[in-house]
Amino acid sequence: MRERIIKGNPDDGPEPVEPEATEGLSSRQPRPHDPVEDKLRPQRLAEVVGQRAVAERLSIALLAARMRGEPLPHILFDGPPGLGKTTFATVLHNELGVELSITSGAALDKKMDVMPYLTNAAEGSILFIDEIHRLPRAVEEFIYPVMEDFRVDVVLGEGMSARTINLPLKKFTIIGATTRSGMLSGPLRERFHMHEHLEFYDREDLATIITVNAEKLRTKISLEAAWELAGRCRGTPRIANARLRWVRDFALARADGVVTPSIARDALDMQEIDAEGLDKQDRRYLDTLIRVFHGGPTGVEALAATMNVAVDTLRDEVEPYLLRREFVVRTPRGRQACALAYRHLGLSEPEPELPISIVDIQRRLFD
Ligand SMILES: Nc1ncnc2c1ncn2[C@@H]1O[C@H](COP(=O)(O)OP(=O)(O)OP(=O)(O)O)[C@@H](O)[C@H]1O
Ligand SMILES: [Mg+2]
C-alpha cells in the first residue's frame, strides 16, 4: 500500500498554523518541528521502550486488523506531553504501511476545515488529530457519524428548503491524542474503541531510551551515566532526549565527548536541574505554593497569575509530574504542598493545626 504522511490540510498543502494566542498567559504553545526528535522517534512497535501493556494491546489490534483486512479501531491516546502519543500514532502507521494525515484540534475551527481530511481519507488510512480536546463542539458533533458509520451529514440550504445529504466515506481510523482527556465530551470519548493512557516511564526504561538514542546520536555514554540521566528527566522520554543532547554537547565542549556520570551531573547542574530532575520552573511552582500561599490549598489560576505563567503550562507540563511524585496533591479546594515539597526545598513543614478541644472552648468562653 502507498505510504504517505500528510501534514496539514490535504487540499491546501501547507502545514496548518494553529490559531494560538501569543500572550504568555493564555495557552499551550504549539511545539516547533524538531528534526532530531523525529530521528529519535521509534518507527516500529518493537523499538518502543516501556508502556508494555499499551504496546501489547496495540499489537493485538494490529494483528486483528491485518487478519480481518479492516482498518484499525479508533484509538484515543491521553497523557502528559512527551510520553509517546504521537510516537504510537506514527508507529501504527508504519506497521500497517498506510497513509497518515496529521492535524490538530486547534486547526479545525469549522466543519469545513475537517471536511477535506474526511473525503480524502483512503481506505484503511489513519487520521491523527492531536490536541483533540480543542475541537469546537460543532466540529466534534460533525465527526460523530464519521466515527460510527463512516458518513458525513451535510446540510444544504437554509430554513424550510434545507436538506441533509449523507455522504459515504471510506473506512479509515481516527487516532486522537490529548493531554486533557477530562475536557473531552462523553460522546466523543465513547466513539473511540480503544482508550490508552500513557504513564510516566520508570528509570530503567528511560535509561534504555537514553542508551539507544545516544547510539543514534553517535555519542558514547556509560551505563552509569545513562542511569544518572534517567533519574533526572521527569519520567519523560522527550525530556530525556533533550537532556541527553545537552549532556552530549557539554561532554564535547568540556571533555573528550564521552558522557560519564560526573559529566552528566555537571551538565545538568549547569542547567539548574536538581537531583530529582526538577527544573527551575518546577521549583518556582513549589516555592510559590509554599511561600506565597502557605502550602495551599490554592487554585492553579492564582498560582499561574503569581508566577506569570500560562495556566495551561502549569496544568499540562508542570503539575502532572509533581502530582505523580507526590510533591503536591489536588484537593477539592486546590493544590496543596506535601511533605516532600518542603523537604525538597529545604524548608520545615508547618505544624499541623490541632483541633480545638472542648476544654479550650470552655476556657475561651469564661476567660
Ligand atoms: N516509548 C518510547 N520509546 C522510546 N522513545 C520514546 C517513547 N515515547 C516517546 N519517545 C521519545 O519521546 C519523544 C516525544 O514523544 P511524542 O512526541 O510521541 O510525545 P507526545 O505524547 O506526542 O507529546 P505531546 O503531548 O507534547 O504531543 C519522541 O520523539 C521519542 O523520541
Ligand atoms: Mg504529540
Image (cartoon, helix red, strand yellow):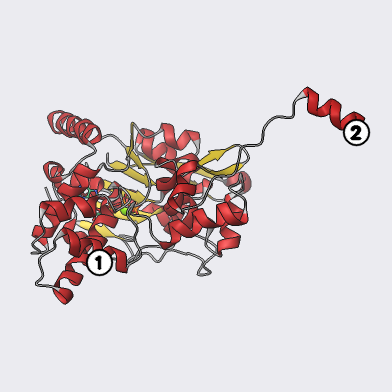
- At which x and y percent is residue 356? 74, 29
Residue under circle 2? 367
Residue under circle 1? 267
Task: Label 2: state its secondary structure.
Answer: loop
Residue sitting nearer the eye, 87 or 14: 87
- Compared to residue 48, the image places residue 289 above or below, namely below
How many marks are shown on the rendered structure? 2
In the image, what residue occupies the spot 29% across and 53% down? 233
In the image, what residue occupies the spot 51% across and 52% down? 347
Mark 2, other Cα within 10 Å: few <14 / some 14–19 / many ≥20: few
Residue sitting nearer the eye, 198 or 230: 230
Give the foreground label among 1 and 2.
2
Amino acid type for the residue under numbered disc 2: Asp
- At which x and y percent is residue 293? 62, 52
Residue that extends furthest to the right in the rendered view of this protein: 366
Task: Label 1: state its secondary structure.
Answer: helix
Q: In which quarter of the image is residue 176?
A: top left
Q: Can residue 179 be seen in this view?
A: no
